[in-house]
Amino acid sequence: MRTIALVAAKGESERVPRKNIRPFANADLVTIKLAQLAEVRHLDGIVLSSESDEVLERGRKAPCDVMLYKRDPLYSTQQVPMSEVYRHLANKVVADVIVWVPVTNPFVEAEVYDDAILIYKAVGGAEYDCLLSVTELKDYVFYRGKPVNFTPCPWPRSQDLRGLYALNLAICILRRQDMEAWGSLVGGRPYFYLRDDVDFHDIDDMYDFEECEAKYKRLKGLE
């Protein structure tokens, strides 16, 4: 079962200019993620896809062999729905299983990817059709004016709230053919990969970028 990491990174970003390749803790997010993936033992390959030559150049300098796919710039625009992007990329890689890896989660290290891949190989198939990293919500959530995960009386403690999860998209694992057919990373029978000991923080805006960079520097002794 050929398992590859698929890293799709644009050269530009709307909320954080050049987010994926702007300086971040003496490197950049693409370079950091490829270095982390180079240490993953249960991958058969890494594919870096981008419309940007600057992004792809990071793949050429990575500490491991990285297959490069320069995609049509159209697939990096808002004009194309993400479903079509997923289908397009799945169609272009040679693999049985895809590990979808955004570069915007700098705290997810090789050990976490290995753990998730082994779990997927153990439970994937008839029981679960994908593995999704999630964050458990400890908030009191309403939907259309109704409480979703709590009762007004008796009022629960926030630490006792259970069963509500948010996709953080740090790791998504699924069969290549399913990704192409679904146009999605999410199937009908997901396995929720929950790790309280891992910071799955996704960098979305400039505040996230600066906060994560400061924390990353502290963790790596780069201050």
Image: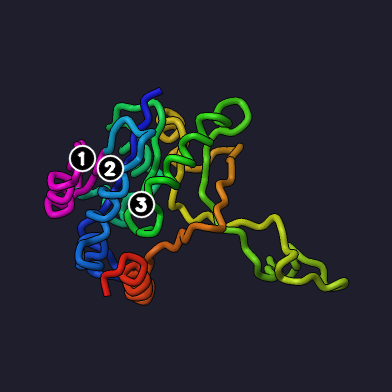
Amino acid type assigned to the residue bearing label 3 in the image: Pro
* Span highlighted in magenta in the image: 47-72
Which SS class for mark 3?
loop
In the image, which is nearer the foreground, mark 1 or mark 3? Answer: 1
Q: Assess whether mark 3 and mark 1 are in contact (beta carbons under 8 angstroms).
A: no
Mark pair 1, 2: CA separation: 6 Å
Residue drawn at (21%, 65%) of the image: 18
**Left or right: 154 with respect to 109?**
right
First of labels 1, 3 by sequence position:
1
Eyeballing the image, is 174 above or below 219? above
- Numbered label attached to residue 46: none
What number is the disc on residue 102? 3
Please say if the residues under marks 3 and 2 sit with CB atoms less than 8 Å apart. Answer: no
Q: Amino acid at mark 2?
A: Ala
Whole-percent x, y for residue 132 in the image: 52, 45
Q: Nearer the viewer, residue 24 or 104?
A: 24
Q: The C terminus lies in which quarter of the figure? A: bottom left
> What is the x, y in percent for residue 124?
55, 30
Which numbered tag is attached to residue 64? 1
Tell me the distance, in whole angstroms, between the alpha carbons under discs 3 and 2: 15 Å
Q: Identify the residue at horizontal 42%, vertical 44% (top origin).
A: 113
Quadrant containing the N terminus in the rendered view: top left
Secondary structure, mark 1, is loop
Task: Give how far apart the Cα atoms at labels 1 and 3 are.
Answer: 18 Å
Query: Few, some or many C-alpha atoms within 10 Å of disc 3 (few <14, some 14-19, many ≥20)?
Result: many
Residue drawn at x 55%, y 29% is 122
Question: Which SS class for mark 2?
Answer: loop
Decide if residue 201 is on the left or right side of residue 187: left
On the image, the x and y values in percent for residue 218 come to 34, 72
Q: Is residue 7 magenta?
A: no
Residue type beneath disc 1 = Cys
